[in-house]
Image (spheres, grey):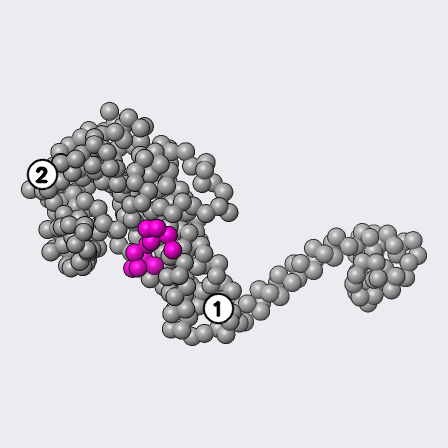
């Protein structure tokens, strides 16, 4: 079996020592505690709804929010099968960092710790987020974990109610997880990712980003109005089942609104349009010049050539003069 399972009681958990102190590295359970949001969602019973309180008080709950709205430190999978704490090995999956298992039915949350957090509300490029989402979706498929799991809260591995085991002591890079997985189904960037885990974040960001590039040009609103419009659109796009938590939607909307408002402007748009126009004109000219030269060599007038190729006769004259001058300079 890959990894060495270590059962850890809550009393064994130590806190992170100060950098100046010497001592053993903290367990990943201690790191789980350190990485918790300042005011996480939490509850003792799922049917009673969620509360938000200071992390010190939230730690006493059976279920807790492991990740904040803008960064994903932990990939969590809900495996509703008896023996879930071990069957990842039979499926050829990487060993989890932490397993929190229900002692009554054997169901478990498998928690994979990332060395570098994934930013779920990136400022511009979707490539890193899409890669992380592909890894997330592929690992869920390999584990045959619940696709309807929202991921907002998980079994709190610091609570004594659960049977907790630490497996892989090292935190994962995405490339480490990738080596266990087949990502070929997620390679086409034109295709929407499954609406699971980071896939939902990626799909929302991509839809919102593409919409914003056009929408901001409708009056170039001030930032407050623009942010409100982007947030409204983001909430409308958050139509998956389960949907993303509203705090993650707000974080994505803020990221898109801030980036587009800072970098897109009427002057910048006009300059970009002009540059695109020049590139398009140069490409079209390159395609037409051979036909223009051929007709000119056959004795056709500038007006006759213009009617055939669909440009003004003065443009034809300019093209031929430039080509003639270039030929003379090359002799």
Give the residue displayed 33% in from the left and 38% down from the top. 140
In the picture as drawn, the residue positioned furthest to the front comes out as 47
Residue 325 seen by the camera: no
Looking at the picture, does residue 259 appear above or below residue 160? below
- Which residue is tagged 1? 216
Give the residue displayed 29% in from the left and 59% down from the top. 247
Location of residue 130 in the rendering, given as x and y in whole percent from the top left corner: 41, 47
- Between 25 and 209, the residue placed more toward the observer is 209
Location of residue 328 in the rendering, given as x and y in whole percent from the top left corner: 83, 56
Q: Which residues are magenta?
A: 239-249
User: Which element type, helix, strand or loop, lies under badge 1?
Assistant: loop
- Between 60 and 78, the residue placed more toward the observer is 78
- Which residue is tagged 2? 9
| Circle count | 2
Q: Callout 2 environment at 10 Å: few (<14), some (14 to 19), or many (20+)? A: some
Relative side of 289 to 13, left or right = right
> Which disc number belongs to residue 184?
none
Give the residue displayed 18% in from the left and 51% down from the top. 47
- Between 147 and 284, the residue placed more toward the observer is 147
- Determine which quarter of the picture holds residue 91: top left
Q: Main secondary structure of the magenta part?
A: loop
- Between 14 and 207, the residue placed more toward the observer is 207
Pointer 1 or 2: first along the chain: 2
Relative side of 31 to 203, left or right = left
Relative side of 193 to 61, left or right = right
- Determine which quarter of the picture holds residue 114: top left
Q: Is residue 240 magenta?
A: yes
Looking at the picture, does residue 258 appear above or below residue 167? below
Quadrant assignment for the N terminus: top left
- Determine which quarter of the picture holds residue 14: top left
């Amino acid at each position: 079996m890959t990894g060495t399972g270590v059962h850890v009681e809550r009393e064994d958990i130590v806190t992170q020592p100060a950098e100046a102190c010497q001592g053993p590295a903290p367990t990943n359970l201690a790191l789980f505690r350190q990485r918790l949001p300042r005011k996480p969602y939490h509850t003792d019973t799922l049917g009673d709804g969620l509360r938000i309180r200071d992390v010190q008080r939230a730690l006493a709950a059976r279920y807790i929010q492991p990740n904040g709205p803008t960064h994903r430190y932990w990939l969590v999978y809900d495996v509703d099968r008896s023996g879930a704490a071990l069957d990842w090995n039979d499926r050829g999956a990487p060993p989890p960092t932490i397993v929190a298992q229900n002692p009554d039915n054997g169901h478990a949350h498998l928690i994979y710790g990332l060395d570098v957090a994934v930013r779920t509300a990136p400022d511009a490029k979707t490539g890193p987020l899409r890669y992380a989402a592909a890894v997330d979706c592929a690992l869920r498929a390999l584990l045959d974990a619940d696709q309807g799991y929202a991921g907002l809260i998980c079994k709190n591995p610091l609570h004594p109610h659960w049977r907790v085991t630490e497996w892989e002591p090292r935190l994962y890079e995405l490339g480490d997880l990738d080596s266990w997985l087949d990502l070929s189904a997620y390679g086409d960037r034109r295709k929407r990712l499954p609406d699971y885990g980071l896939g939902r974040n990626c799909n929302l960001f991509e839809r919102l980003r593409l919409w914003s590039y056009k929408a901001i040009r409708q009056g170039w609103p001030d930032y407050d109005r623009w942010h409100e419009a982007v947030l409204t659109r983001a909430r409308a796009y958050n139509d998956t089942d389960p949907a993303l938590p509203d705090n993650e939607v707000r974080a994505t909307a803020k990221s898109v609104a801030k980036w587009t408002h800072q970098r897109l402007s009427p002057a910048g748009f006009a300059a970009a349009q002009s540059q695109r126009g020049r590139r398009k004109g140069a490409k079209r000219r390159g395609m037409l010049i051979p036909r223009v030269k051929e007709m000119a060599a056959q004795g056709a007038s500038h007006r006759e050539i213009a009617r055939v190729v669909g440009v003004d006769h003065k443009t034809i004259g300019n093209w031929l003069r430039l080509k003639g001058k270039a030929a003379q300079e090359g002799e």
